[in-house]
């Protein structure tokens, strides 16, 4: 019979469970008329845990690493396209449009601080 999480084995020791955690995050950023950049990051890790609280704590830690990786990947992708540095922000309705100093394109992006809500 399989043990449930938080169940103590017959010898009085907490059971140790193993899980493979797979998470992905992605963001599509409009870089111009009919153009967009798709940034995707994925993470897979095997964790061991004794109870649900420990599993949730480790899963949240993986999420934080993945969120940071996504933010850095967005900056890197836009930087390699010459779209990171901006001369100004033009507001149109509820959207922000960054005007790139390295090209004449208008790019709908948010600042790295705005990505905290991702």
Image (spheres, rainbow, N blue to C red):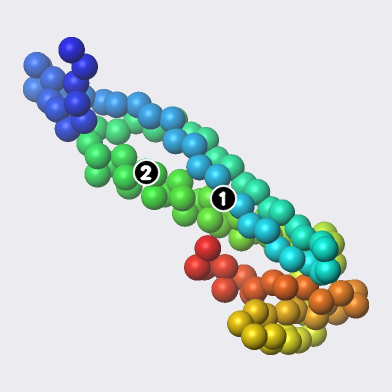
Of residue 72 and residue 29, the one placed in the foreground of this image is: 29
Please give the name of the residue rendered at 67% of the width and 80% of the height, measured from the top-left corner: 96
x and y percentages locating residue 91 in the rendered image? 69, 87
- Residue 55 placement, left or right of 41: left
Distance from Cα at disc 2 to Cα at disc 1: 17 Å
Would you call the spot at circle 2 few (<14 residues within 10 Å), some (14-19), or many (20 or more)? Answer: some
Please give the name of the residue rendered at 19% of the width and 21% of the height, measured from the top-left corner: 3
x and y percentages locating residue 25 in the rendered image? 56, 50
- Label 2 with label 1: CB-CB less than 8 Å: no
Decide: is 113 above or below 18. below
Secondary element type, mark 2: helix
Q: How many labels were placed on the picture? A: 2
Would you call the spot at circle 1 few (<14 residues within 10 Å), some (14-19), or many (20 or more)? Answer: some
- Residue 85 placement, left or right of 3: right
Q: Earlier in the sequence, mark 2 or mark 1?
A: 1
Please give the name of the residue rendered at 35% of the width and 26% of the height, measured from the top-left corner: 18
Corner quadrant of residue 50: top left
Decide: is 5 above or below 54. above
Please give the name of the residue rendered at 82% of the width and 69% of the height, measured from the top-left corner: 32
Corner quadrant of residue 10: top left
Q: Which residue is mark 1?
A: 25
Q: Which residue is mark 2?
A: 58
Decide: is 82 above or below 68. below
- Residue 111 placement, left or right of 100: left
x and y percentages locating residue 39 in the rendered image? 69, 53
Secondary element type, mark 1: strand
The quadrant of the image that shows the N terminus is top left
- Residue 92 placement, left or right of 85: left
Do we see residue 79 in this rendering? no
């Amino acid at each position: 019979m399989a043990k449930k999480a938080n169940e103590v084995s017959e010898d009085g020791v907490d059971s140790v469970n193993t899980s493979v955690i797979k998470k992905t995050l992605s963001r599509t950023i409009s870089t111009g008329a009919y153009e967009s950049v798709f940034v995707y990051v994925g993470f897979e890790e095997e964790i061991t845990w004794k109870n649900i609280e420990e599993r949730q704590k480790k899963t949240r830690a993986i999420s934080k690493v993945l969120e940071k990786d996504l933010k850095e990947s967005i900056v890197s992708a836009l930087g390699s396209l010459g779209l990171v540095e901006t001369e100004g922000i033009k507001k149109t309705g509820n959207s922000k449009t960054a005007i790139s100093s390295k090209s004449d394109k208008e790019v709908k992006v948010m600042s790295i601080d705005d990505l905290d809500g991702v």
